[in-house]
Image (cartoon, rainbow, N blue to C red):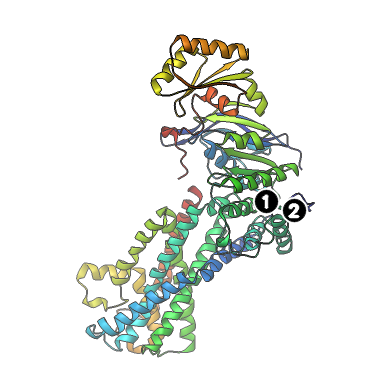
Amino acid sequence: MLAMEFMIEAQGLVKRFGDVEALAGLDLTAEAGQVFAILGPNGAGKTTFIRTIATLTRFDAGTLKVAGIDVAKHPKQVRRAIGLAGQYAAVEPAMTGRENLRMVARLFGHDAGTAERAADIVLEQLGLTEAGDRLVRTYSGGMQRRLDLGASLVGAPKLLLLDEPTTGLDPRSRNELWVAIEDLASRGTDVILTTQYLDEADRLADTIAIIDHGKLVASGTSDELKSRLGRDVVDVRVHDNENLTRAAAALGPEAVVDRDSCRVSLPVAGGPDELVAAVQALGEADIALDDIALRRPTLDDVFLTLTGHTTQAATDSAQEQDA
Amino acid sequence: MTTVITPIPAPAGTASFATTTFTTAGRTVRKMLRTPQVLGIAVVQSIVFLLMFRYVLGGAIGVTGVHYVDFLVPGFVISGLLFTAGGASVAVAEDAASGLYDRLKSLPISDWAVMAGRGIADALLMVIVALITTGVGFIVGFRMNTSAGAVLLALGLLVVFALTVACIFVWLGLVSGNAQAAQGLSILAVPFSFISSAFVPIATMPGPVQAFAKAQPLTFWVNSWRGLLLGDPVTRSFDHSLEYYILGGLVWAVVLVLVFSPLALRTYRKR
């Protein structure tokens, strides 16, 4: 591993698509030697950001260094340092797994012999050795994604970029891919991944950056982010929207409303006493409750508190545009 | 997955232009060979239309100097390049949508080499279809009247024309954005092939149409092939010498490549 203190240093990064600012002055630094997750809802700017890192999208303002290299000045050098696996499996269905890997390895600059070895190593690493000589069109969706991940590895990149690596996968394939990513990270590959799944960020990442509307909202370890919420959360579920509004009013300004699931959550410091207080406040306001509980905060709560909406709530105005 | 595995060494250098072109073209060719329906459809379509022109329309079309089948086959083969190329632009649009180009653009390779690889592979497919169609032409009565040197020159020109057409249709595939749109755009092949000397003598067309037909590249290319394969009987009826059509055809090829390959490269980089 070459000495690099930061895998990413972004300052005031702006990218516009017409009137929409996909990146609206993003400031973000990620230290080397870890798995770094960029978490945000659809349209937050995640894909645009990873595409600027991968030199695929040119930004309009700001500065961006990847592995210490200025992206605007030396995109070719950045390309030598990164491996990209996108949202779609960019592998050729009419070639075998091995042929796919060999092709990408050759393009990374390996000679024929090393390309062959790199393909073997990656197949082994991702548990695809047996399927290696089958045409990719016979692979399951999960296997195709794993092969795609493998294709980004054959050039021994310093930094692996994964854009929503498990979107659209079934739970089992998702888990397999997680294991593969953890395995890579444990061997010392730096990883940046984008995700809209909190559990994915929680499980894989050392550091999580939450972005929304093209800006950094918060960053830190999963524990740090959770601790920003206080110790516990009082979780209230009601039946309808009217009760939801009234419940939120009864619980005070700290309460966070999630309309999709008809829930109000209230970060608290005092534990059970505050649960009792909340029950009393709701009782006095005469609100019919479906459920009320005291629980540990999750990244969901952090996200909701920081952005005012859940990760699933797509913001129509800022749909990520790749075209 | 936790067994001890030797790490992959960092690449010693970067892939050369030739390696990149060869590797990416290799992928396209493999894909074509392993999805034989693509090549198959192109060939069948070509044969069906050839038979229609030969046996249905041919009797009503009068040409001077040679049999209609001799007149037809060179025109049919050369204009067929455009129809086969339509399939190439659909394939390019599919590649663009699949995320393949994002992967290629994130690699330390030359974008020019990627485009060259694509164009060469597509040109190869076009040449194969053209040669098969010519073979079918022989079966339905086409006969050459020429020398070995002229045939070689004709084959060389075929490759040049195919590369030129590939540049244009790769660009069309990139700008179209998706396979359906690419399919739609490939209908451009129809006016260009019909308003040329490919199927009927230009002299029978009305004035403005005739002017277009005389100036456009396909007429130059078709007449070069016709002249080279059929010799005197057909060149006597040309407005100009055979050299005029060959040189003009090459000039057109150079101009088109100079215009469309940078366009294709720019579109590839931007999307």
Residue identified by numbered label 1: A153
Relative image position of residue A296 (x, y in whole percent): 62, 23
| Other-residue count near label 2 (Cα within 10 Å), few / some / many at <14 / 14–19 / ≥20 | some
The dot on residue B8 is 2
**Residues at badges 1 and 2 in contact (C-beta under 8 Å)?**
yes
Position of A199 with respect to B4 (left or right) is left
Q: Nearer the viewer, residue A258 or B229?
A: A258
**Three-letter code, disc 1:** Leu
Q: Amino acid at mark 2?
A: Ile
Q: Position of residue A292 (x, y in %)?
A: 53, 20
Residue at horizontal 38 percent and vertical 83 percent from the top: B227
Q: Which mark is residue A54?
A: none
Question: Relative to the observer, which residue lies in front, B109 or A243?
Answer: A243
Quarter of the rendering containing residue B182: bottom left
Say if labels 1 and 2 share a chain: no
Observer able to see residue B254 = no
Q: Quadrant of the C terminus of chain A?
A: top left
Q: Residue at x 28, y 67 (%)?
A: B212
